Amino acid sequence: MSEQKQDHVDRILAQWRRERPDLDVEPMGILGRLKRLGTHLGREVEAVLMQHGLSTSAFDVLATLRRSGAPHRLSPGELLEMTMVSSGTMTNRIDQLEKAGLVERIVNPQDRRSVLIALTKKGLATVEEAVGAHVANQQRLTRNLTAGDRAEFDRLLKKFLADFE
Amino acid sequence: MSEQKQDHVDRILAQWRRERPDLDVEPMGILGRLKRLGTHLGREVEAVLMQHGLSTSAFDVLATLRRSGAPHRLSPGELLEMTMVSSGTMTNRIDQLEKAGLVERIVNPQDRRSVLIALTKKGLATVEEAVGAHVANQQRLTRNLTAGDRAEFDRLLKKFLADFE
DNA sequence: GCAATTTATCTTGACGTCAAGATGTCTACT
DNA sequence: AGTAGACATCTTGACGTCAAGATAAATTGC
């Protein structure tokens, strides 16, 4: 019972059912909602991080370094493994953060092919502040789901995600 | 019971719990999985559309025109309402599709500020073919979820999405 | 009718991303 | 030692996106 009101995606599906009744659009509903939700959430997250002078990309790198624990140093390759981006993208992110004085490249005397990316004092202070606001924002964004909804949603996301990683 | 194995996001959360036990990271798990899943799904979708010579962006516009029904014409403004992108992005998408001969701009004699974007014969043929492959791909991507999972997942997505639109 | 406002689309410049390949370094084997 | 291959990072060029503002046309109010 208590079918929710027709939303944007329902209208899209209704158009397809009228125009192409041969297609099974149930998966399209799920994937369409997932994509729209991701876009909305991404924008909400970005808005808060921007108040701390960070893009989502920049925050991702700083947060990865921070949660790796002291001394807050990882190689570009290690950062790459944790962030689903290409090597070129990571190089670019590190360049920007270095220009902003939030990380520094430290040569690795053991292996001169590689470098270590280290949080600077300023980078650590910035990410510590930003992560608090970010987590509070994430709580705000999920507060309209009940505890049961959140648990069930997370279970389904984890199961679905497991198909791809 | 039957807790699933630790995944990438679980490892991130474990790091945060060790480094910042003061933070409540439950929402971060949900939002993190949602983002990663969206990235994976986006790449899978793109791969199939590329086989038909289309980017996801291009397909979105062609599909919006197709499902609007004959004569498959909408103004840029109408396309904008349905696609969550900025006006500059839509102009660029239409430019690319026009160059490729998949749509054409038709002047609107009623209102010379606006134009109508129409699927060409080639555009219609392309999207009809692509949408079949796309829907089949979406079924493949969701086939590891049970019917019950899919219904529940869709319910939660719809409820969550409603907060933002 | 005419000016001010609103509407619809397009332009510009900046940013983040990727794939492909270049560069420099290390390792293993001869 | 020397060389072939593997490895780690960076460079390049193309693409899609956005915010902000430009342009042009329609509408409203006087």
Image (cartoon, coloured by chain):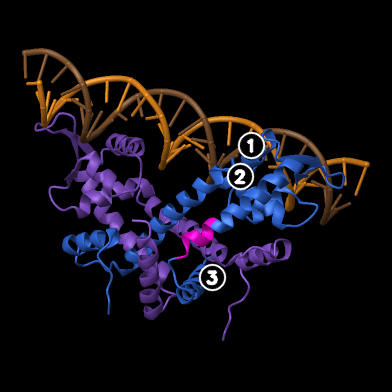
Chain colours: A purple, B blue, C orange, D brown
Residue interval drawn in magenta: B137-143
Question: Considering depth in this image, is B19 or A114 the residue closer to the camera?
Answer: A114
Q: Is residue B129 left or right of residue B111?
A: left
What is the spatial separation of the Cα atoms under label 2 and label 3, in whole angstroms?
Answer: 26 Å
Majority secondary structure of magenta residues: helix
Q: Are the numbered discs 1 and 2 placed on the same chain, yes or no?
A: yes
Residue, x 76% and y 51% (percent of image)?
B72
Question: Considering depth in this image, is B141 or A12 the residue closer to the camera?
Answer: B141
**Residue neighbourhood size for the residue with mark 3, other residues' Cα within 10 Å, grouped as few (<14), some (14–19), many (≥20):** some
| Residue B120 visible from this viewpoint | no
Q: Which residue is mark 2?
A: B58
What is the spatial separation of the Cα atoms under label 1 and label 2, in whole angstroms?
Answer: 8 Å
Instruction: Check disc 2 and give the amino acid type.
Output: Ala
What is the spatial separation of the Cα atoms under label 1 and label 3, in whole angstroms?
Answer: 33 Å
Magenta stretch: residue A150 in it?
A: no
The subunit letter for the residue under badge 3 reads: B
The label on residue B96 is 1
Q: Which residue is mark 3?
A: B162
Is disc 2 placed on a helix, strand or loop?
helix
Instruction: Check disc 3 and give the amino acid type.
Output: Ala
Residue, x 70% and y 57% (percent of image)?
B67
Q: Is residue A52 above or below residue B27?
A: above
* Residue C10 location (% of width, % of height): 68, 36
Q: Is residue B111 left or right of residue C18?
A: right
Q: Are marks 1 and 2 in contact (CB under 8 Å)?
A: yes
* Residue B25 location (% of width, % of height): 28, 66
Closest to the camera, between mark 1 and mark 3, is 1
| Residue A155 visible from this viewpoint | yes
